[in-house]
Image (cartoon, helix red, strand yellow):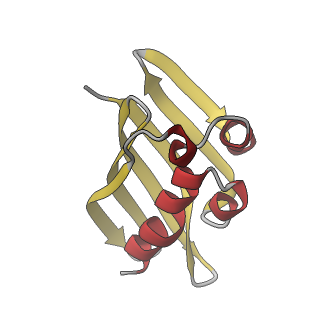
Amino acid sequence: MEIAQVLENEYFPGIYTGNVEQLRKVYHPGTLLFGDVKGQPYAKTLDEYLDGVANRQSPKDSGKPFEGKILHISIVNSIAIAEVMVKMYDFNYHEFLSFHNMEGKWFIVNKMISDVV
């Protein structure tokens, strides 16, 4: 499945290594990110998010466990939702990623996250 390949080959490795260019390949430029982290509201543009990724210690360099896991993918024509879990640093993120297929490629167009216990 193409979306699973995007997640396994680009999204999870890009987060793990902090590779902003790799992440740019999977996000549509207009992507917005919403949710909560430690109970606090979280809202960022793609550029704000990627700036944070570029300026933090990567999960790989932190030495802490990292895991990206696909829970479910639903596809209807050119739209899809992927439900994933990402364990990094001391966080367990439950994420809903909205995808849109444009020009034969799946892009993340919205990311919603919640830090869960």
**Residue 12 location (% of width, % of height):** 47, 58
**Residue, x 47% and y 41% (percent of image)?**
63
Of 64 and 102, nearer the camera is 64
Q: Residue furthest bottom?
A: 104
**Residue 101 location (% of width, % of height):** 54, 74
**Residue 45 location (% of width, % of height):** 68, 38
Direction from residue 75 to residue 17 in the image, left or right:
right
**Residue, x 35% and y 51% (percent of image)?**
67
Of 66 and 79, nearer the camera is 66
Q: Residue furthest front?
A: 63
**Residue, x 35% and y 81% (percent of image)?**
1
**Residue 110 location (% of width, % of height):** 53, 49
- The picture quadrant where one finds residue 95 is top left
- The picture quadrant where one finds residue 22 is bottom right
**Residue, x 57% and y 79% (percent of image)?**
105
Please, is residue 96 above or below residue 108 in the view?
above
Direction from residue 115 to residue 53 in the image, left or right:
right
Please, is residue 73 above or below residue 113 in the view?
below
